[in-house]
Image (tube, coloured by chain):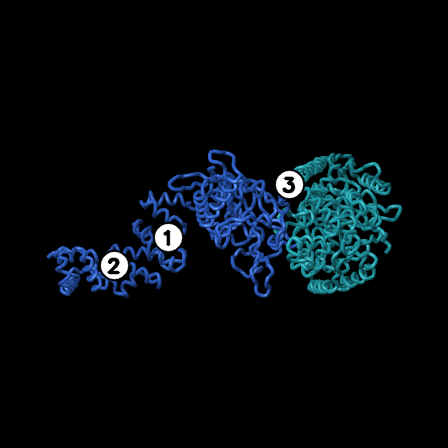
Chain colours: A blue, B cyan
Amino acid sequence: MKYQVVIGLEVHTQLTTNTKIFCGCSTRFGATPNSQTCPVCLGFPGALPVLNQKVVEFAIRAGLATNCSITKRSIFARKNYFYPDLPKGYQISQFDLPICQNGHLDIEVEGVRKRIGITRIHMEEDAGKLVHADVPGIGDDSCVDLNRACTPLLEVVSEPDMRSPDEAIAYLKKLHEIVRYLGICDGNLEEGSFRCDANVSLMPVGSTTFGTRAELKNINSFRFIKQAIEYEMERQAELLDEGGRVIQETRLFDPNTGTTRSMRGKEEAHDYRYFPDPDLVPVIVDDAWIEAVRKTLPELPDAKRQRFVTEFGLPEYDAEVLAASRELAEYFEATVALFPQAKTVSNWVMGEVTRALNDDGKDITESPVTPAQLADLLKLIEKGTISGKIAKTVFDEMYKTGKEPGKIVEEKGLVQVSDTGAIEAIIDEVLAREPGQVAEFRSGKEKLFGFFVGQVMKASKGKANPALVNELLLKKLNG
Amino acid sequence: MEIFELTIHELHQKLKAKELSCVEATRAMLARIDSVEERVNAYITVTPEEALREAEAADRRIAQGEIDILTGIPVGLKDIFITKGIRTTCGSKILHNFVPPYDGTAVARLKERGAVIVGKLNQDEFAMGSSSESSFFGPTRNPWNLECTPGGSSGGSAAAIAAQEATATLGTDTGGSIRQPASHCGCVGLKPTYGRVSRYGVIAYASSLDQVGPLTRDVTDAAIMLGAVAGHDPLDSTSVNTPVPDYLAGLNAGVKGLKIGLPKEYFIEGLDPDVKAATDRAIELYRSLGAEIREVSLPHTEYAVATYYLIATAEASSNLARYDGVRFGHRTEAARGLADMFAKTRAEGFGAEVKRRIMLGTYALSSGYYDAYYLKAQKARTLIMQDFLKAFEDVDVLLTPVAPTPAFKIGEKLADPLQMYLSDIFTIPVNLAGTCGISIPAGISADGLPIGLQLIGKPFGEGALLSTAYAFEKGTEWSTKKAAL
């Protein structure tokens, strides 16, 4: 029997507001346990939640960027269950009336475009963290750190529109890119600020009735998501082929074995007893607010990629790479504004700049070389002051020291030698030194040309103008 | 008159005139508490050291010429109010050792005005009850008859006024928990409109019904206390941002031409004869003072008790989930694993009535029953609220009894919880509608037990409510009657 997989994705994005969703505590990652808490996020008796307006603004941004309709009157609801990392014994979330509904994202897999529906986006608070590892002074017991409790989350729920692991990954990467572009989430999967759960089911090819789905959790990289979905597809197919039934359950992905296993022992079907939270009033969003937020939306990745192709004439590949992050795109554009040769800038940004940053473990916002400095370097090449090859050396020095390119060229005496006479002198020296090779070349071994070029460049410490070297060397060798 | 018998405004005059110091006033109150507490059990925690420190600070302010009407006044707080550094139990074993790290808003506002907190008052556990018998710390006794309950859940707050163990107290009212004990103890008890006073720092029972209010010796004192704690609080999303009027300024407005409505559903057959007599006398008095008496109807009254016991318990089942032994309060010593810890901590920590209501509320919210119970109850609530709003198109104030009978004996109603629930029949609808109500002394039964009169005002109409009550107080002598302890 051949099966068609149906995939729906739920993504929890941690918002980068300064303070939590219902209290004024900081959301900064990595602080001493329980140092960023107060009676509200600790769930103390008598404490009450107060909504952080920025969270609503971020939710509207997310909704507009994904073509959702923004709910004018949305409600917070309590999701009730007991767990030590959930201080109130309930999570404040949204149930019946989420802030955003009925949106979509467009993805492209192997040249085929597809629209993936977004059912809803809603606001909720995060739980704290349980630490099970050996804690100094505590030993084997589990400990609760509530710094993360009450951090704002946006949950994005897709329609079950994906029909392959690749489509799922494309959707996730798109969503990941969008939330980072919007500046509402840092998208750090390892730190848990972008968490994906996948709902996977199979149906016979040609059928329109969905099968029973399993929910896959605990997947913290795009690669693992693909692995998990593929494993699950195999597992369910085998089960169905043997005449068994897929059980609706939560399954944990184990990255070590690449398999999923049932959590059924730990978590029975929960009745969360949702009801509207009586401590909070409905969230009213009017058209004026929506328009004000719309005006603050940055150019989104798809539009930017388009514009890089049409306005700058860049190949699609370059546009793809440069627009992958808003900051990288901005770096690129800032450089182009000062040195308007887009392809050259693109090559350098995708090349040297990215390489240096990767080696250094830094990201574009931490680049010691500014767009202005890069533009200056490129101007020096254009003017002929230095060769492209020397420019790479200069760039490395700029990266290390933060000095201006002009200064480095001057200090290190790297100005390109374009004096024909000087180059001829070097060529003459080299040819005189290598009579044997000269003879071989003249008798037909044309490949030796590169050897001579190399010798001339070495003798000039790399500063000879390569185009001139080629021209003059050829003349001299050919007689 | 003894210091501990004085009202806020009387004591204030004496403090202002420097006839005595705040420390002396507080000492007198603490001595009074000492002498009667064993019989009354109004307090869970008395705080003599903190009180004297606050009294000293109040004296220093007065010496510098700063005196506010509440400066140096000894006040008791129901143990549902979060007080920084002072044990707050909510009448429960599960919080028997809980010392909060912060002050709630109402408490902070009283302290800012210079009030002296003398202690935390007894109550039904988690405010669930009408007799204060479910307190982990034993029942409070009614100072008018020590074999009777003072009512509940703010039984300690009312008894403290009746036994003169505080000049004024704060309580909370979710289904009548200020008004009913005030009625049973012969003092004034006011439930403001929902949203008038901040709930931040009030241990939550039913979030959409709970309100903070004063219990006092007279109406003037109630106006003073309300003015001190009322007003918008950014820490409470349900607190309303409307200005707080000067409740004292309008007290003497009188009732000429005032339209008083009598909801016919409240004047039922079989009302206790003493309660009926007191209510009839009150109606006559208002008539003689120039008010116009009209009959009105609140047709959905019969659904109020059921509606309340679905909504309140549902909200409570969620509000009390935080008592899990993880971060504060009681934690079982006998746990084998997580689920066991949760179960045993709560089994050990909660009393029977609390458990009953948590189970009821959980059931009302559960899958398959939510629509039939919780959702239906919310719809009924809307109808009940509309009844009141419609009635207030014709009249200014409603007049009703507070409780079907005077105070009952300790232990009398424990066998059948439903019997206890039905005694809230006149007070519950006011909480469901969210509007304001006051209980004022209006009679003494043949057995010598106080009987209160309830006045119900328009939303945020506490001003008219207080002046209507004031007119009655001035026209009668019930407020001057004292329990003979």
Residue type at mark 3 is Ser
| Of marks 3 and 2, the one in the foreground | 3
Residue type at mark 2 is Ile
Q: Chain of mark 1?
A: A
**Front-lying residue, A358 or B286:** A358
Q: Are marks 3 and 2 in contact (CB under 8 Å)?
A: no
- Quarter occupied by the N terminus of chain B: bottom right
First in sequence: mark 2 or mark 1? 1
**Front-lying residue, B284 or B78:** B78
The answer to whether dots 2 and 1 both sit on one chain is: yes
Which residue carries the number 1 mark?
A331
Pinpoint residue B312: horizontal percent, then vertical percent.
70, 44
Residue type at mark 1 is Tyr
Which residue carries the number 2 mark?
A386
Disc 3 residue crowd, few under 14, some 14–19, many 20+, Cα 10 Å: some
In the image, residue A140 sits, relative to residue B106, either above or below, namely below
Marks 3 and 2 sit apart, C-alpha to C-alpha, by 75 Å
**Front-lying residue, B40 or A139:** A139
Res. A53 in view: no
Q: Chain of mark 2?
A: A
Secondary structure at numbered mark 1: helix
Rendered image: mark on residue B367: 3
Pinpoint residue B244: horizontal percent, then vertical percent.
67, 48
| Of marks 1 and 3, the one in the foreground | 3
Q: Are marks 2 and 1 in contact (CB under 8 Å)?
A: no
Furthest residue to the left? A479
Tell me: A217 left or right of B77: left
Marks 1 and 3 sit apart, C-alpha to C-alpha, by 54 Å
